[in-house]
């Protein structure tokens, strides 16, 4: 049996790229590596994250339903971005505050610490760090 491959990319559907693309650009702090219309019926903006992971946002030509994201529906619950330590999470608290992004503060658990927040469409996002000492 082959070993399970690493995650290469995540793509979230957004309602309006003119709102979400600048929001993610400001959060991530880099320009996208792709910003284009596709032949598949959507426009996408893609960011290259560390460790060769891509993070994309898509706006489809078919209008999205007039509802916010809910992690209680079957499908995506949240997307978590890796941080090396709780100290790095504390830096992200300051950065989210600077950007005016509401968050839930750092929550510590035996398996690690998380900092949860939402994008303009309500998609659940998190910065996550492993517990101290591994």
Image (cartoon, helix red, strand yellow):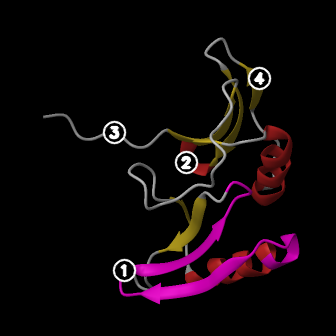
Circle 2 SS class: helix
Figure quadrant of residue 32: top right
Q: Which residues are magenta?
A: 97-121
**Is 103 a magenta residue?**
yes
Circle 4 SS class: strand
Q: Residues within 10 Å of mark 1 (few under 14, many from 20)?
A: few
Distance (Cα) linking label 1 and label 2? 22 Å
Q: Which residue is the site of mark 2?
A: 51
The spot of residue 124 in percent (x, y) is 58, 62
Distance (Cα) linking label 3 and label 1? 23 Å
| In front: label 1 or label 4 | 4
Closer to the camera in the image, 49 or 25: 25
Distance (Cα) linking label 4 and label 3? 27 Å
Q: Which residue is the site of mark 1?
A: 111
Quick one: label 1 or label 4, which is nearer the N terminus? 4
Quick one: label 3 or label 1, which is nearer the N terminus? 3
Closer to the camera in the image, 83 or 18: 18
The spot of residue 19 in percent (x, y) is 84, 47
Q: Residues within 10 Å of mark 2 (few under 14, many from 20)?
A: few
Quick one: label 3 or label 2, which is nearer the N terminus? 3
């Amino acid at each position: 049996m082959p070993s399970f491959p690493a995650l290469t990319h995540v793509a979230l559907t957004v309602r309006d790229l003119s709102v979400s693309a600048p929001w993610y650009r400001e959060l991530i702090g880099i320009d996208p590596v792709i910003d284009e219309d596709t032949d598949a019926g959507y426009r996408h903006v893609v960011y290259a994250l560390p460790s060769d992971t891509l993070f994309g946002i898509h706006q489809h030509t078919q209008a999205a339903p007039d509802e916010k994201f809910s992690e209680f529906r079957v499908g995506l619950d949240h997307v978590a971005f890796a941080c090396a330590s709780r100290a790095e999470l504390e830096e992200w608290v300051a950065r989210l505050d600077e950007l005016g992004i509401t968050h839930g503060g750092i929550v510590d658990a035996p398996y690690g610490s998380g900092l949860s927040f939402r994008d303009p469409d309500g998609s659940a996002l998190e910065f996550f760090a492993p517990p101290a000492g591994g």
